[in-house]
Image (tube, rainbow, N blue to C red):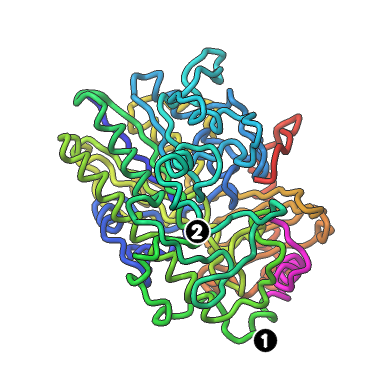
């Protein structure tokens, strides 16, 4: 027997929402315990701050420019490289339970495999692999899939629709009648994408994902090696956890986050020093991400709405923490605990009030780019606990899974196995991480490239709808951890800016050609 791998992801989670990362609103003792016993990364950076490109990076170990998923709605090719396929080929049992999002969700005709599996009643289908062979779809022999809603054709939606149809209406309607992202507000403050959801906790998708993960593990033999990706849809909006759980966090007691300037004039002064699309979105005149409601104006966001969003987000994370604990208990009951590596992370962050904004988009700041990442190596591996301050990326996850399994890292992977401490990071050259954004949605075109290196975040803009290609952002993370002072045009920073821009361009991967088509908005 080898080491088994439990890969846990959330969706759209900030770094500072875990207790081990300084979070104070919710309680996450299980995940904090993994961090205490393992390796906690203080500067984990996604290669994209939106779902589909970022999740494709996790699976392939490639940057978006390489795997080609340049924005939400662009399907990852069926024969794209996959770390799950490498593990399955080596004898691992493989499963993905929860949110996949390698293919568009808006798929009314069932064009994409992941949207057909539940309808067809099959755990997977044969698909071409990167090397020309054929195996289970993307290397996973078992799928049970969910997203944020009980609508649609994924497994969780069919579970609710067939067995508990009365619960479906309690969830927030993600899309409005025009198939646009819903701007309706709810809760106590009227915050957008908030609703009191009467669904019983045991029917909510968080517990469902944990239940189905345990059920799949229960079907394995004791001596089998396995890789399961347990992918929770929360705490991504909408913020509609079971109403029975809202008493965990009183939103009225939640402090305003440091990144939210409560003074409107100060907020707008900070935004005005950034490239134009920041203020234009704040004023509601330009939306550059489909998942941000077009009918909501961020300038209307109130202090209490920020508090309520933070509270509901924390409730959702407490439920995830408890679900992870249940799965770990089931693993221990099988006698596997000493040989299981646990990796916990998310695909990207959430603005959650920073700069007076919610949701996500082409905004390369810590709210979206600083992620929780924890690797608790199997106790049998005898790896000392550590905190890594060097920058790492989600592109490094796939090579890490290969390293855990004792497999060579394929040449098509662009990252490297995560360092186990700062000395290891220095020895193996972990010094810079790239992030990219491309979008053409709602008539708005935005192109962004960022490098995180030496305590700086440097962002360049390509020509687009409101950018001429000369704009940029430059932040000194030591002096300006909230990224409120843009040093791009500061003469005192010209040398470091020019050096970072040159390094960014030298490291940037060439774009995949021809460009993959945009199949759906999300």
For label 1, the SS is helix
Q: Is residue 218 among the parts visible in the rendering?
A: yes
Classify residue 314 as left or right of residue 71: left
The region drawn magenta spans 271-289
The residue depicted at 55 percent of the width and 56 percent of the height is 453
| Residue situated in front as seen by the camera: 170 or 26 | 170
Classify residue 515 as left or right of residue 508: right
Quadrant in the picture for residue 465 = bottom right
Residue 437, relative to residue 378: is it above or below? below
Disc 2 marks which residue?
A: 370
For label 2, the SS is loop
* Residue 329 horizontal/vertical position (percent): 20, 45
User: Is residue 272 magenta-colored?
Assistant: yes
User: Is residue 407 magenta-colored?
Assistant: no
Q: Which mark is residue 430?
A: none
Q: Which mark is residue 265?
A: 1
Quadrant in the picture for residue 241 = bottom left
Pointer 1 or 2: first along the chain: 1
Instruction: Mark 1 and mark 2 in contact? Answer it, CB < 8 Å.
Output: no
* Residue 319 horizontal/vertical position (percent): 34, 57
| Residue situated in front as seen by the camera: 415 or 372 | 372
Q: CA distance from mark 1 to mark 2?
A: 27 Å
Q: Is residue 257 among the parts visible in the rendering?
A: no
| Residue situated in front as seen by the camera: 30 or 374 | 30
Quadrant holding the C terminus: top right
Quadrant holding the N terminus: top left
């Amino acid at each position: 027997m080898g080491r088994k791998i439990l890969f846990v992801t959330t969706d759209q989670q900030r770094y500072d929402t875990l207790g081990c990362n300084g979070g104070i609103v919710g309680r996450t003792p299980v995940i904090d315990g993994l961090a205490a016993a393992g390796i906690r990364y203080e500067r984990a950076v996604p290669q994209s701050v939106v779902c589909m490109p970022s999740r494709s990076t996790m699976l392939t170990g490639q940057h978006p420019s390489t795997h080609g998923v340049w924005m939400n709605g662009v399907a990852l090719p069926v024969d794209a490289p996959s770390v799950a396929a490498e593990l399955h080929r080596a004898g691992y049992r493989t499963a993905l339970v929860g949110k996949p999002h390698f293919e568009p969700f808006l798929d009314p005709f069932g064009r994409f495999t992941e949207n057909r599996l539940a309808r067809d009643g099959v755990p997977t289908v044969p698909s071409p692999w990167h090397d020309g062979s054929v195996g289970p779809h993307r290397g996973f022999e078992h799928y049970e899939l969910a997203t944020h809603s009980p609508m649609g054709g994924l497994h969780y939606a069919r579970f609710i629709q067939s067995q508990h149809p009365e619960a479906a209406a309690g969830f927030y309607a993600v899309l409005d009648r025009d198939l646009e992202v819903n701007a309706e507000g709810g809760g106590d403050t009227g915050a957008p994408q908030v609703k009191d959801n009467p669904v019983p906790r045991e029917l909510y998708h968080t517990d469902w994902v944990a239940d189905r993960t345990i059920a799949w593990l229960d079907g394995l033999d004791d001596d089998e090696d396995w890789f399961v990706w347990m992918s929770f849809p929360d705490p991504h909006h909408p913020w509609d956890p079971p109403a029975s759980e809202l008493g965990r966090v009183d939103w009225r007691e939640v402090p305003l986050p440091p990144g939210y300037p409560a003074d409107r004039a100060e907020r707008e002064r900070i935004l005005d020093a950034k490239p134009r699309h920041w203020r234009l979105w704040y004023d509601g005149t330009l939306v550059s991400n489909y998942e941000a409601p077009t009918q909501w104006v961020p300038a209307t966001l109130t202090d209490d709405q920020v508090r309520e969003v933070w509270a509901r987000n924390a409730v959702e994370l407490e439920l995830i923490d408890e679900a992870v604990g249940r799965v770990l208990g089931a693993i221990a009951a099988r006698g596997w605990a000493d040989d299981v590596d646990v990796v916990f992370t998310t695909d990207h962050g959430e603005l959650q009030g920073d700069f007076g904004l919610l949701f996500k988009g082409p905004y390369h700041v810590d709210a979206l780019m600083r992620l929780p990442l924890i690797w608790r190596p199997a106790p049998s591996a005898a790896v000392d606990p550590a905190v890594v301050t060097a920058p790492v990326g989600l592109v490094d996850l796939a090579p890490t899974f290969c390293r855990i399994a004792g497999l060579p890292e394929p040449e098509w992977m662009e990252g490297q196995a995560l360092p186990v401490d700062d000395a290891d990071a220095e020895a193996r050259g972990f010094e810079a991480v790239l992030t990219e954004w491309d979008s053409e949605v709602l008539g708005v075109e935005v192109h962004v490239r960022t490098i995180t290196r030496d305590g700086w975040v440097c962002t360049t803009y390509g020509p687009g709808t409101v950018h001429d290609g000369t704009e940029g952002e430059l932040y000194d993370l030591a002096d300006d951890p909230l990224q409120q002072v843009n040093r791009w045009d500061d003469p005192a920073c010209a040398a470091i800016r020019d050096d970072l821009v040159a390094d960014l361009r030298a490291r940037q991967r060439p774009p995949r050609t021809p460009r993959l088509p945009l199949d759906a908005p999300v």
